[in-house]
């Protein structure tokens, strides 16, 4: 069994981004907007800021308190859209209850949309003409390529259908000619379906939910989950049981998470470059 090392690949991507940033006339700037209320988000945003330092990207963090209104949030996004020093905007998800994620994302200017989640960028992704896909799915494809995993013709099962992860990775796998099945909370006989997968991607937010019984012998397993059990980070896959059965698996931590951050740096560079070329 091979452990798919996301941490090392993420470092390689960040080194390359730093070199590319040095070729720009002006340093890129990434604004992270964090609405307080989700303790895990603090850690993720800190990791993103640290990566910006490593890549020579100017990072700005805007913290909004939990009671911020939709209008206040959208006004903040608007101000960043207009700021010439800001190349990319990332709205840290999930937002607290009461705020409309879809509407807030819609306010981000598509040419500063670091995670490619606006309707315009999602549309481009689905039309196969996008150079900028959401960070997590982009990272997963890079990892599969790094380990020469054959995608074409394989049965890929994606569990979870968020736009951010499930739907986007399903689409990227389809573009690479996998046969893709998408599962979600209403899927009947989940285990029967996942246990046929050559490539199994899990993004459901349920700690250690996918045990060995859900996995085909020799499958490649990508665990996107970032969950906590007794304060300790773990994934949606029960690593200890599944590792005995699969051929390759991402660890948590050290798998998909660092790649998401590295691909955010890459997307920020790409957006800055496009803006400077205009
Ligand atoms: N590693 C990273 O960089 C990274 C990045 C983003 C997210 N994450 C992590 O990935 C996980 C998923 O995130 P997300 O934003 O995609 O989550 P999300 O928006 O909450 O979506 C969860 C999805 O899982 C499905 N689901 C929930 N329980 C299920 C079950 N028992 N069986 C089958 N499907 C089930 C839901 O189905 P319905 O649609 O039917 O409700 C939904 O589609 C979380 O742990 C999150 O922290 C990690």
Image (spheres, rainbow, N blue to C red):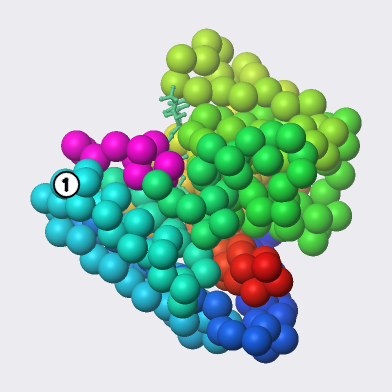
- Residue stretch rendered in magenta on the structure: 96-106
Instruction: Pinpoint residue 4: horizontal percent, then vertical percent.
Output: 68, 59
Is residue 107 found inside the magenta-colored segment of the image? no
- Residue 217 can be seen in this image: no
In the drawing, does residue 187 fall left or right of residue 1? left
Number of numbered discs overlaid on the protein picture = 1
- Residue 70 can be seen in this image: yes
**3 or 226, which is in the foreground?**
226
**199 or 51, which is in the foreground?**
51
Q: Secondary structure at mark 1?
A: loop
Judged from this view, the residue extending furthest toward the top is 188
Q: Residue at x 67, y 29 (%)?
A: 157
Please tell me how crowded label 1 is: few (under 14), some (14-19), or many (20+) other residues with Cα within 10 Å. Answer: some
Q: Residue at x 55, y 13 (%)?
A: 189
Q: Residue at x 46, y 77 (%)?
A: 85
Q: Which residue is mark 1?
A: 69
Judged from this view, the residue extending furthest toward the left is 67
Is residue 100 found inside the magenta-colored segment of the image? yes
Instruction: Pinpoint residue 106: horizontal percent, then vertical percent.
Output: 43, 42
Instruction: Pinpoint residue 90: horizontal percent, then vertical percent.
Output: 43, 59
For residue 44, which quarter of the picture?
bottom left
In the drawing, does residue 77 fall left or right of residue 50? left
Query: As displayed, is residue 119 above or below residue 33?
Result: above
Instruction: Pinpoint residue 47: horizontal percent, then vertical percent.
Output: 43, 72
Image quadrant of ligand 1 equals top left
**114 or 109, which is in the foreground?**
109
Q: Residue at x 51, y 43 (%)?
A: 118
**32 or 49, which is in the foreground?**
32
Quadrant where the image shows the C terminus:
bottom right
């Amino acid at each position: 069994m091979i452990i798919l090392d996301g941490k090392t690949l993420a470092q390689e991507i960040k080194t390359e981004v730093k070199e590319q940033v040095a070729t720009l006339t002006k340093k890129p700037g990434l604004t992270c907007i964090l609405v307080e209320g989700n303790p895990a988000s603090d850690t993720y945003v800190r990791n993103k800021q640290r990566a910006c330092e490593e890549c020579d990207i100017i990072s700005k963090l805007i913290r909004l308190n939990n009671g911020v209104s939709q209008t206040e949030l959208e006004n903040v996004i608007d101000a960043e859209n207009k700021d010439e020093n800001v190349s990319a905007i990332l709205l840290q998800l999930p937002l607290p209850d009461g705020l409309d994620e879809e509407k807030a994302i819609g306010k981000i200017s598509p040419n500063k949309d670091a995670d490619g989640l606006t309707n315009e960028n999602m549309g481009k992704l689905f039309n196969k003409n996008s150079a900028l896909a959401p960070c997590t799915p982009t990272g997963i494809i890079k990892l599969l390529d790094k380990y020469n995993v054959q995608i074409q013709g394989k049965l890929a099962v994606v569990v979870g259908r968020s736009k951010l992860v499930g739907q986007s990775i399903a689409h990227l796998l389809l573009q690479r000619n996998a046969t893709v099945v998408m599962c979600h909370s209403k899927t009947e006989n989940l285990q029967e379906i996942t246990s046929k997968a050559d490539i199994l991607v899990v993004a459901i937010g349920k700690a250690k939910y996918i045990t060995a019984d859900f996995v085909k012998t020799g499958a490649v397993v990508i665990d996107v989950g970032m969950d906590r059990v007794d304060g300790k980070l773990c994934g949606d896959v029960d690593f200890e049981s599944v590792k005995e059965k699969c051929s390759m698996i991402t660890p948590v931590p050290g798998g998909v998470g660092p790649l998401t951050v590295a691909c955010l740096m890459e997307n920020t560079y790409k957006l800055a470059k496009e803006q400077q070329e205009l």
